[in-house]
Image (cartoon, helix red, strand yellow):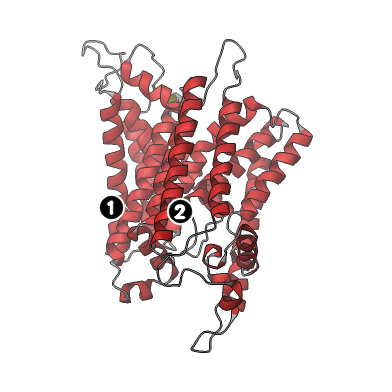
Amino acid sequence: MARIDSDLPPAVSPAAASAADPGGAAIDLGAVPPEILAHSLAEYVRGWWVKVKAGDSGVLPVVLGIVVVAVVFQVVNAKFLSPQNLVNLFEQSSIYMLLAMAEIFALLLAEIDLSVGLVMGLAAVVVAELVQPSAPASCQFCTHGLAWPAWLAIAVTLLIASGVGAIQGTLVARFRMPSFIVTLGTLLVLEGAAIIVLHGSAVAVSNKYVSGERTIYDIFWGVFSPLVSWILLIVVVAVTAAALLRRDLSKRRRGLVTPPLGITLLRILLLAGAGALVVGLSNVNRAHVGTIEGVPFIIAIVLALLFIYTILLQRTRFGRYVYAIGGNPEAARRAGVKLTSVRIWCFVLAALTSGVAGILFASWQVSITVNIIQAANGYVLLAVAAAVIGGTSLFGGRGRTIHGVLGGLVIGGIYNGLYLIGVPSAWIDVAVAGVLVAAGTIDVLSRRTARSQA
């Protein structure tokens, strides 16, 4: 929804906010962002707690879930919180995170996209096929690829994925077809298309002597050097800190409401601390033989998409329109929002993100087979689970891309932890399903609480 930054006076105390307005209606504290009422860190915390009691718990449940998962599995197996396993855990969870971010674009509209797993599968096959080296026509058993450079193969793959999203969005938005039916049909079509493109055989990206294959392989398995990792962290923290402080200063000069300085400084410190922890863990040698040190490329890719999508949804008109449509499409239409174009673009962004996940999936799997394509079908359920576990509502209008990252981390942690203690895969699925049901229950109860206090 649109942020409140210019319609209120620059100083609104909690006491004044709780008083009746000129029309006689009391202001709902639970519906007001804490930074609107807060003049200090303590007031901000109190305002945040009011929102939690009103049913808007934000990322609190999933953060607590991550803590519980970490503590339980560390007690059972001391290797769980080792630097090697934590970096491996994030790498394994990256696919869940990206697909969850893709799914969130549909869930925010109160829709669903069942095709994200197979868009990923098709993208993995396409990018792997495009970078295969060419071979003489006389060689029957040689790979006959197009030998495209990696950048061109990636661009074409993402264009194809976006085209799939555009078709789905058009059918849903213009022809008013249920998204469940449209994306289910697309799922089946894409599975067949991926197998056809694969020609029934395996295609690999492991040949280090082929430039395109080597580049695709390094997307998942490549790392920044330890020195470059620290330099990148310093640059990111410095740029973020400067942007936040400059934004707050600009608002104060214009007499607009800004969060307390302590909150901004706390955010910067948390970013710096979390980044230092990630870089420190990644710089530990993770190889059983030889040396593997440094932040994996995959971490930078996930965080870059998280940043871009957060800005898109939280700081742009398009993002406000998405939340408005998910919250009340009829009210959004009457306010002049072009529902059709916004919905189409959401499906395009979902498919585009799934395409990025497909490129990473090809790099991760190294060799793509028919069985792997068919297994990609199950990732859509994990994508929905990760988004909901992270805090995105199934009913539309509430959710952020950070929810996909945190939810994906929970699912990855459950899979990783249960695998470490030797639990059969069937029970791992049961555990993930249990967490999903719990997250859905929290979503329903929080909405019921919000309605009862309205």
Residue flagged by tag 1: what amino acid is it?
Answer: Ile
Q: Which mark is residue 167?
A: 1
Residue name at image x 64 percent, y 28 percent? 85
Picture mark count:
2
Residue flagged by tag 2: what amino acid is it?
Answer: Ile
Relative to 161, is 332 above or below?
below
Q: Quadrant of the C terminus?
A: bottom right
The answer to whether residue 113 is seen in the rendering is no
Assess disc 1: are there few (<14), some (14-19) or many (≥20) residues with their C-alpha within 10 Å of its C-alpha: some
Residue 282 image position (x, y, % from top left): 57, 26
Q: Secondary structure at mark 1?
A: helix
How far apart are the alpha carbons under marks 2 and 1? 18 Å
Sequence-earlier tag: 2 or 1: 2
Is the Cβ of the residue at disc 2 closer than 8 Å to that at disc 1?
no
Q: Secondary structure at mark 2?
A: helix
Which one is nearer the viewer's eye here, 62 or 281? 281
Extreme front residue here?
253
User: Which quadrant of the figure has residue 84?
Assistant: top right
Q: As drawn, is 57 to the left or to the right of 311?
A: right
Residue name at image x 78 percent, y 36 percent? 75
User: Which quadrant of the figure has residue 30?
Assistant: bottom right
Residue 297 image position (x, y, % from top left): 45, 28
Residue 368 image position (x, y, % from top left): 42, 27
Residue name at image x 22 percent, y 11 percent? 136
Residue name at image x 39 percent, y 56 percent? 250
The answer to whether residue 26 is seen in the rendering is yes
Q: As drawn, is 260 to the left or to the right of 162?
A: right
Residue 123 image position (x, y, % from top left): 35, 36
- Which residue, given by chain and number where applicable, does mark 2 sit on? 104
Relative to 431, is 16 above or below?
below
Tell us which disc is closer to us: 2 or 1.
2
